[in-house]
Image (tube, coloured by chain):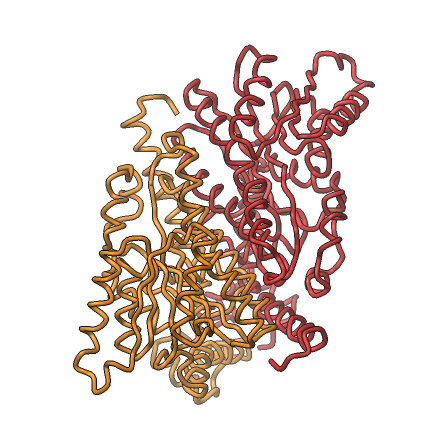
Chain colours: A orange, B red
Amino acid sequence: MVWTPADLLWSLTNRAGLTAFESVCANLFLVLIASLGVSPVYNLIRGSQFNPKGKHVYVTGGSNGLGRAVAIDLAKQGAHVTIVARKEGPLKETVELMKQAVAARKNPTEQKFHWISADVTNKEASIRALDEASTHFGGKVPDVIMTCAGTAIPKLFVEASTDEFEWQMKLNFFGALYTVHEAAKRMVETGVKGKFVLVSSAMGLIGFAGYSSYTPSKYALRGLAEGLRNEFLMYGIKMHIYYPGTMFTPGYESENLTKPLVTREIEGSSGLTPEEAARGLMAGLRKGYFAIATDFDTNFLRVASKGVSPSNNIGLDYLLGLVAPFGAAQFLWESGYKVKAYAKKHLKKDI
Amino acid sequence: MVWTPADLLWSLTNRAGLTAFESVCANLFLVLIASLGVSPVYNLIRGSQFNPKGKHVYVTGGSNGLGRAVAIDLAKQGAHVTIVARKEGPLKETVELMKQAVAARKNPTEQKFHWISADVTNKEASIRALDEASTHFGGKVPDVIMTCAGTAIPKLFVEASTDEFEWQMKLNFFGALYTVHEAAKRMVETGVKGKFVLVSSAMGLIGFAGYSSYTPSKYALRGLAEGLRNEFLMYGIKMHIYYPGTMFTPGYESENLTKPLVTREIEGSSGLTPEEAARGLMAGLRKGYFAIATDFDTNFLRVASKGVSPSNNIGLDYLLGLVAPFGAAQFLWESGYKVKAYAKKHLKKDI
């Protein structure tokens, strides 16, 4: 028999006329379809996993870009928000924006918004900032820590300086680590079952020309999150990691100043506003996802490099995983082609 | 019809009696079987991708553990070998072992073995060591760079100090980076189509309790290798990364001194000798694999988290990828269970 969609539908309800092999395939197909529903139903039953209303959320890099958008989104959801960054001006501005966002509320004054000027790449400053944030909450460690501070300096490897590698590791990885380490110790000591959200990047899931100094710092965050997700089960503390794709932030504009042409060609020009990225992050947190991605490409990367970390939608992740190797092969070929074409045109040496 | 192996074999040659659907499945099955042969045949046609005979190979961490085993293996293959590490004693010992390994050769004196005492976590020392190594070869940069220096300090996150995080990142990641960066610049300047081999770890592919300070540094190496593999296509330079599982080295013994009980329970006790690991690495390099793993578990992790990086055996990697999510789910459950059981027993707090 030749299978049409009508045959397919029919076979799912009536197995007469099917060979044994076709019946087994029909069953497998049914299982696959059913598996698509497992995670949504599970999520529906257990309900939202993230409601920041009345919680104290501590956001590093909160003065602009994703951090600012996250802070404002949290404010709208009723959270107390402390933002940490270096520059006073943008910090004050963001607090103003949070206040405006909740001004129409019944009791906007119940929400506390604070800013702290601190350099998170400095361990002592990170601890002091956490201390300061806690003073407004009876000394209690924040309920949720979101580390949004980060920067990228895209360059060709041989044109980058190792100082740039050190700086990006210092800010992107250690800037998160110092805060996470101190906050986790306090949560464990005081029995707070808190939540951490690390912000990595699509470049924490893939590496290509021009990001050699950025990618390692974002991979390092992935490694930290994957390990701590398991380890924090000891204390009931939750770990999440967010892999945003391109975001049109002030940081994006500054990285474009040094970005090699070939890097632009490989990464393309699509992206999200920080507000969209923040909304996507919140949606992922409500579903309780460990690894959060907000656009199709990054979700594809997340699935392709999932390793031993939890699925989001079990059935869909599995299905995507079946086709991921083909997409990966195409990207490998394309990015390889672009790099070699760039070399031919710009390096003028035989390869 | 019911399928037996005999039916299966028969169907591959004679499609009579099969429904159209069964015939399509038979074709897909044939494609899958055929795909298992694609990579081996391709590897056979293009031949060995690594013959260190007469090449100058520069091995950091070459005084003991994997680095020493790699150096001796390379010596046996006819390479000139420069080993770099801090301690003179073990360095001299390793050079002696290399000399002994080739003593029975016809012209053992043609091979050059050198040792350089240098701290690879220091950028200037790394550059000086490369300079020194080059002087024996007319100032030419080594043909192959293998970065084997590394260390692990397993501890529970809240019991680790951030200094330990910094030290492991400094040695495991920057200790490789400084050498790779300087050598790559020289290769590009002088048109040497060299080869880099970074040594990560199975913990560069997975994270769990006790390795939070180690995992990020090994993930960072993965990110570096994945990006540079693409970028170095510009220059004809090859990048490889090795993910060894547990190796019974002096480093393994020292890390066991601080290793939490729960970490031992999760990781198990199987492992390889450094000599076996070195042989596995060489086999992977000969096949031209980008990502090299030598035991089944690590190969499983490699496939499960392959992301956008090249396959080793295209068909086999795809097949392994089909079952990887099930293995990953089991490991997730088991490691989660072990961590919670550990907490119940040792932390004596409600979770």
In this picture, is B16 found above or below B250? below
Q: Which residue is rendered at x = 29% and y = 54% of the image?
A: A246
Whether residue A9 is visible to the viewer of this picture, yes or no, is yes
Q: Which residue is rendered at x = 53% and y = 69% of the image?
A: A186
A326 vs B159, nearest the viewer: B159
A288 vs B312, nearest the viewer: A288
Residue A343 percent across, percent down from the top left: 33, 29
* Side (left or right) of A111 relative to B186: left
Residue A117, quarter of picture: bottom left
A120 vs B128, nearest the viewer: A120
Quadrant showing the N terminus of chain B: bottom right
In this picture, is B66 found above or below A184? above
Residue B295 percent across, percent down from the top left: 68, 51
Q: Report the label total.
A: 0
Q: Which residue is rendered at x = 27% and y = 43% of the image?
A: A264
Q: Which residue is rendered at x = 55% and y = 66% of the image?
A: A185
